[in-house]
Image (spheres, rainbow, N blue to C red):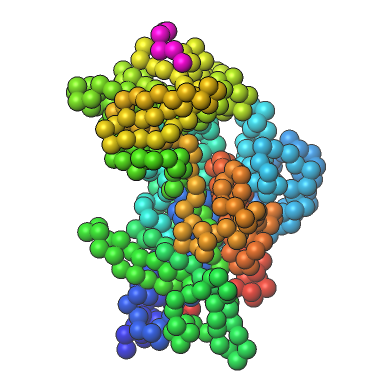
Amino acid sequence: MQNKKLEVALRAEGSLRGDRQHPREFVRVMDQTAQGFTTLPVVVIGNGPSAICLSYFLSGYRPYFKESSVHPNPILQRKLEANLGRSIVDQDLQFLSEGLEGRSHSPVAILFDSLLRPDTDLGVSVDSVLSWRLEPDQYIPHLVLGKGPPGGAWHSIEGSMFTLSLGDWMELPDLPFRDWMRDKRRYLRNDRAVTADIAQYYQHYVQAKGLQENFACGTVVTSVRRLRPLAGGEERTCADWEAPTPPSERPTHASLFEVNGCTIARDSSEKAFSIYAENVVLATGTYDSPAWLGVDGEDLPFVHHTTSEVETAIEEHQRGTNFDPILIVGAGLTAADAVIAAHHGNVPVIHMFRREVNDPGLIFNQLPKVMYAEYHKVHQMMVQQACNSTGPYDGYLSLPRHRVVGFTPDRKCVLQDLASGESRTVNVSVALILIGSDPNLTFLPDRGRSLAVNTELPVNAKRNPIDVDSYTYECTQERGMYALGPLVADNFVRFLQGGALAITSALSKARADGSIQSEGSL
């Protein structure tokens, strides 16, 4: 009787948006007996902007070329006019992408960005050539799993920091960010927004577009395993993707993924779940696992790897609790944000990094000075007060070409000059190691290394992304598994949306071919 009730409660009607059960109810599989199973066409791991945009597409929203629009690229214009009345999702993305150039490595990302923001890189403001329609019959049941609220890591970033990208480039389809800001009586500075506004915008987007029923927040995925069919209908797990569920307790559908995890309640209690999916999308981003130096003492309580402790250090200094300087390690924008915050709080800073101050590879040299004045000010500080704390920037010391040797429990740090080899010991109140981050793929065998471009190295957003097909974003090494966003080196919100388009196009075609189900099953 319990299984029968669960079947009635969970079965999804994919064609009726208003009547279907919430896909998030599928996490209740932990309440089933061994004979009851839940299978979904798509499970998305991660709930940041990549996952939100994908959910928007999978929910049946479709982009069309506006008949009255004129795209500045005449070749693309002719291609679009030849398919008037046909959704971009259903068109040949490779054909549409041919010949387009832009700031992304992905042809579909460049295509979709060009349709949303024509000629934006030229500083031209041109309206989107797309209109959007909700087509309920195109809905593909899916479940988005995330640890926190929709928006992912944006809720973990210190809220007063400004985004690198323009505010308009942070928006998702069919909800202008400027309009949302205007409604909130908030404004952009130099066309850029603070991260707190971005996080709120993404959370609002899910509600405004009616996507919340597809999201299961407060969930942590612990493993994803592929089930392989054998002759006679039996199943086994693929060599190094071994699943813990006994074969007698698995659904009989061929070649499914088993997604295991737990839900975390407000009282911190946990409850395990298992979901079976025909397709899995990796949309975890890369912010969850900050990079470590790998030196002695790095796990001491005064050593941190995010900017979240900057405000605490400033408050301690202002209260007179600790007057020693903050050590900031790194030469990227996150480290620069920490320098800005500490300097504005009148807290002394030792800023250490491995590169030369005039290294052309530093990010500061790639940013327009007018738009990113605060970052160029940090670079100026790095240059003018290199190895010298005397100068116009009181309390700031820049140490280029240095490395951390280790930390000691009495809040001391040993630094080494890479040029001379000499070492020095400094007292610090707090150490912030801000040298980037890596994706948290611990739920995959070998942390997903088998999916990377170079399978001998860990997955890294910049140096070794997950290897996917350029037009479907399906992993080349694992059929039915997709990845998008920073995991495939689409590190900017404006470009990761092309991945959502590509995946939706691939899944829609698979559904039309009968390769995936149009609704969940038990």
| Place of residue 116 in the rendered image (x, y in percent of width and height, measured from the top left) | 62, 42
- Asked whether the viewer can see residue 264, the reply is yes
Image height of 246 relative to 76, above or below: below
Quadrant of the rendered image containing residue 128 = top right
Q: Is residue 30 magenta?
A: no
Q: Which quadrant is the C terminus positioned in?
A: bottom left
Query: What residue is at 34 percent from the left and 58 percent from the top?
Result: 218
| Place of residue 397 in the rendered image (x, y in percent of width and height, measured from the top left) | 41, 17
| Place of residue 231 in the rendered image (x, y in percent of width and height, measured from the top left) | 62, 89
Q: Main secondary structure of the magenta part?
A: loop
- Asked whether the viewer can see residue 506, the reply is no
Query: What residue is at 39 percent from the left and 35 percent from the top?
Result: 406
Quadrant of the rendered image containing residue 3 = bottom left
Quadrant of the rendered image containing residue 234 = bottom right
How many tags in the picture?
A: 0
Q: Is residue 391 magenta?
A: yes
Query: What residue is at 32 percent from the left and 35 percent from the top?
Result: 408
Q: Is residue 519 left or right of residue 342?
A: right
Q: Is residue 89 left or right of residue 248?
A: right
- In the image shown, does 44 or 84 lie closer to the viewer? 44
| Place of residue 36 in the rendered image (x, y in percent of width and height, measured from the top left) | 40, 83
- In the image shown, does 431 or 60 lie closer to the viewer? 431
Query: What residue is at 34 percent from the left and 43 percent from the top?
Result: 299
Image height of 67 relative to 323, above or below: below
Image height of 228 relative to 259, above or below: below
Segment colored magenta: 387-393
Residue lying furthest bottom: 232
- In the image shown, does 519 or 491 lie closer to the viewer? 491
